[in-house]
Image (spheres, coloured by chain):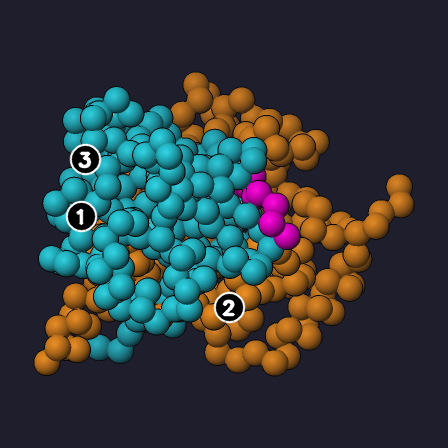
Chain colours: A cyan, B orange
Amino acid sequence: MPDLVATPGQTIGPFFHYALPFDRDRELVPPGRPDAVRLHGTVYDGAGKPIPDALLEIRQADATGQVPAVEGSLRRDGTVFTGWGRCAVDSVGRYSFTTVVPGPSSPGGAAFYAVTVFARGLLNRLFTRAYIPGDADALEADPLLAGLDPEARDGLVAVREEDGSLRFDVHLQGGRETVFLAFPRHA
Amino acid sequence: MMSNLDSQEVVSKEIADLHAGAEGETQPRLDFAPYRSSLLRHPTKDLRHADPEGAELVAPVFGHSDIDPVEADLTIQAGGEPIGERIVVRGRVLDGDGRPVRGQLVEIWQANAAGRYIHKGDQHPAPIDRHFTGVGRCLTGDDGSYAFTTIKPGPYPWRNHHNAWRPAHIHFSLFGTEFTQRMITQMYFPGDPLFALDPIYQAITDQKARDRLVATYDHDLSEHEWLLGYRWDIVLTGTHGTWMEADDA
Ligand SMILES: [Fe+2]
């Protein structure tokens, strides 16, 4: 059967705030959990200015590398890990998820958060990855990272902050432009 | 009042120039200067090709614990009948191989009949309808079908250029069976005179692709003395399960 042609995307526009965010949308695990980590950062435009009207979603495995396929994201009860979260940035472009550090999807692989970015002014969603820092061998061997120049590669690896949190900034454009992804069959 | 915004004529000329060199594109350009807000918000480098793995191959799952069936009816959420033309929008969510996307979340948001959003950033001096929030959610059925009962949204002005108006639209947020299929788009209504003037709609440079965002009026969906029916099917990108098996073979 021939492929169907995908429906075009469009910008999320400026007026999503009363529709898409929901209670505890960014809390994949409750903030108090001992293994909770904060994944946070700022979304910037091509002039280096924070974007106040972007929305990020993350999709991830649990600490063992299993990707949960369970309901319960929209009405979180604090006990079920669904592996998906949503966060609208604040007025100075910052987002913050409370979650766990994902394990790699295959032994020895590099673990990452799958990230999708929406914004007013951005005509279609963008995909990227926030890799977990620390396992140098795994990062070195990752097929995507291996093909990037060092600066672009560094932009895809989250930074471990002094407080233990992970920082991952998104640059839609400019000298530090984030590497965004096209998957096969996206054409 | 004097305005330093470009005229529609200037923007329409830019759109025509960008369309002149284009053919067969199926998705919007990210770099589309007539939409002024895109200038500093589009990546300048090509997207990097990656093989999806792990979490990218599994969409989040939603179920009946996540949403209430009444969330699919935007005319009964706020304690009274909203003003406007009552409609139903019905269709199917399919993947790139034509398979229905079952039991998956569809979210919508829209302006009211006067073209006003319930959003503190919407300063358009049109009336708020206290009986209309403009937000809906549902889960697709086994055949990928979704349906929302709502009010036909009005067009609204924006500040992209002088006298800029968005064609009436409903924002749609969609998931497939893989996270790689995640998408957000806008559904339009047939015959809107604002289509040619709108740089967001026209960022899709191919007419056939633009048509895919336009619902069709379907008289069989209309209900006697009650509402008008629109049909709009959505096709997501293809999944990779079979693709990767084929790759290994
Ligand atoms: Fe809108």
Q: Which residue is mark 3?
A: A81
On screen, residue B223 versus residue A36, left or right, reads right
Residue lying farthest to the top in this orientation: B79
Disc 1 to disc 2, how far (Cα)? 30 Å
> Pointer 2 indicates a residue of which chain?
B
Residue shown at 57% from the left, 59% from the top:
A174
Whether the residues at callouts 1 and 3 have beta carbons within 8 Å, the answer is no
Q: What amino acid type is highlighted by mark number 3?
A: Phe
Query: Element type at marker 3?
Result: loop
The majority secondary structure of the magenta stretch comes to loop
Q: What amino acid type is highlighted by mark number 2?
A: Lys
Disc 1 to disc 3, how far (Cα)? 14 Å
> Pointer 1 indicates a residue of which chain?
A
Residue shown at 52% from the left, 62% from the top:
B43
Residue shown at 80% from the left, 57% from the top:
B7
> Which of A30/A138 is in front?
A138
Q: Which residue is mark 1?
A: A103
